[in-house]
Amino acid sequence: MGGRDATMVLLDENGIRCDGRKVDEPRRIMIKAGGLKNADGSAYIEFGDNKILVGVFGPRDVHPKHMSDTDTGILRVRYHMEPFSVGERKNPAPSRREIEISKVIKEALEPAVMLDKFPRTAVDVFIEVLQADGGTRCAALTAASVALADAGIPMRDMVSAIAAGKVADTVILDVNNEEDQAGQADMPIGYMPNLEQITLLQLDGILTPEEYKKCVEVGVNGCKLVYELQKKALNDKYFGNGGD
Amino acid sequence: MTSTSVIDELKKSQILELLEQGKRVDGRALDEPRKIIIETNAIPKANGSARIRLGDTEVVCGVKIQPDRPFPDTGDKGLFICTAELLPLSHPTVETGPPQPPVIELARVVDRGIRESHMVDVSQLVIEKDKSVIGVFADNVVVDYDGNLFDACSYATTAALLSSKTPKWNWVDDQPSLVEGESVDLPISTIPVSVTMGKIGNHIIVDPNGDEWESMDARITITTDSNGNICALQKGGSGGFTQDEINQCGDVSIRVGAKIREKLKEVQKGSQ
């Protein structure tokens, strides 16, 4: 992504990371439910320096028609990054990376959404990454859950997401861009906190069997923190003074 | 597939019923992969190749090695790029045209498994720093489909890379010049093995065949290296796993992967 300092220390002798966080400390997370007028449900998330907007439409008619399913509703997810969201301008056309992320986010949300209640319809989730700084798929998944709930779509649980990882041979929570580029491993996790199901899991980087189990544990615990913030966002809109 | 046929539903309930008794449709144990048949150097015009069968799934991987320009930020490293494609002759539902999301995911997961293990030591593939490096391109084509393309393509790529010989280039007059008649083995640092597991009901099975693949609630592909460490993972499908299941799958991938690695090592011995 350019501009990163080759001499950067990922973890200093006091256990402090390159952005001043402790090993088990997530970045600042701000979630807002609602905000878009035309979408049936929406959410905005700031996850460190990530800024992501999600709009949900549906359940609505399926176009093209052949995609519709007589037994169940279908979920469609588009994860898209703006050309200005990263250091060097990104081609606005969907890349292979974005297509894969759209698919894993869709599959992470599907177990939570009660689509069987709406046969022959589609629920569309549009994720727009306005600014990216490592961990966009987790932030996007977290915001998409809030937007689905905001749209009033019946759900079995929320899906909360955060990444665990490894830098300087230490397992950490919430991998930022520098840690992703220069670190040893990145493991994004999506988790349904009440059903205790992991619905998104990826890994790149080398982990021993022990580190692997530790990463899953750290990630799942991180998701529980994120879940509290998702609930707060919905509470603020529907039961607090933050409504619009 | 937008609608499931009655036959699919019947097959699915039969698969689940058998699993309740600890059995699988083709008689395998839950953690038993299908028979793997590896034929290397199947394509002599490629620098390395393998044609492999995993049960009735069949994949051909060809490796082409040629000079290329390095990426701007990694001028001291060669290139490794791995692709995968489903040919229209592999299954009646496969259509020609641009790749669909599942095929894009397949190619990216296979590439990631090999790449993250650092199997090909790209630091040894430099002709002239910042100007010219050696590119290794592993292209997989699926010629027959019976489930679990992730592992089939991964084994095909690994076997093809293990059998690859790289030509030699010198830097002459500001361009790479082929040294005739000289070739060496690719610099290989580890043998990655991917193990894909499917979850049907509460049962986890290794290497799902085509019918099992259609019946899965979720799947997970875990790649391990020669040291028994985990180097890549991808969960897929519209279901979830518990934390315990994820830990279990990690253990299974290391254990089952070690046996498959022995089979791939024979390829390495055969090529030397």
Image (tube, helix red, strand yellow):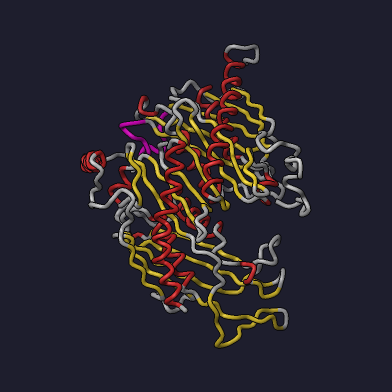
Of A228 and B269, nearer the camera is B269
Q: Is residue A73 left or right of residue A165?
A: left
* Residue nearest the viewer, comparing A16 with A243: A16
Q: In which image quadrant can residue A147 be found?
A: top right
Please say whether residue B45 is one of the residues in the magenta stretch. Answer: no
The magenta stretch is: A60-72
User: As drawn, which residue projects farthest toward the bottom?
Assistant: B181
User: Where residue A77 sits: x, y (%)?
Assistant: 49, 37
Which residue does the image show at 60% across and 20% down from the upper left? A232
Say left or right for B268 vs A206: left
Which residue is more in the foreground, A57 or B269? B269
x and y percentages locating residue A95 in the rendered image: 56, 50
> Is residue A207 depicted above or below B240 in this figure?
below
Q: Identify the image quadrant of the N terminus of chain B.
A: top left
State whether residue A154 appears in this view: yes
Residue B259 in picture, x, y percent from top left = 39, 60
Q: Is residue A61 magenta?
A: yes
In this rendering, position of residue B109 left or right of residue A180 = left
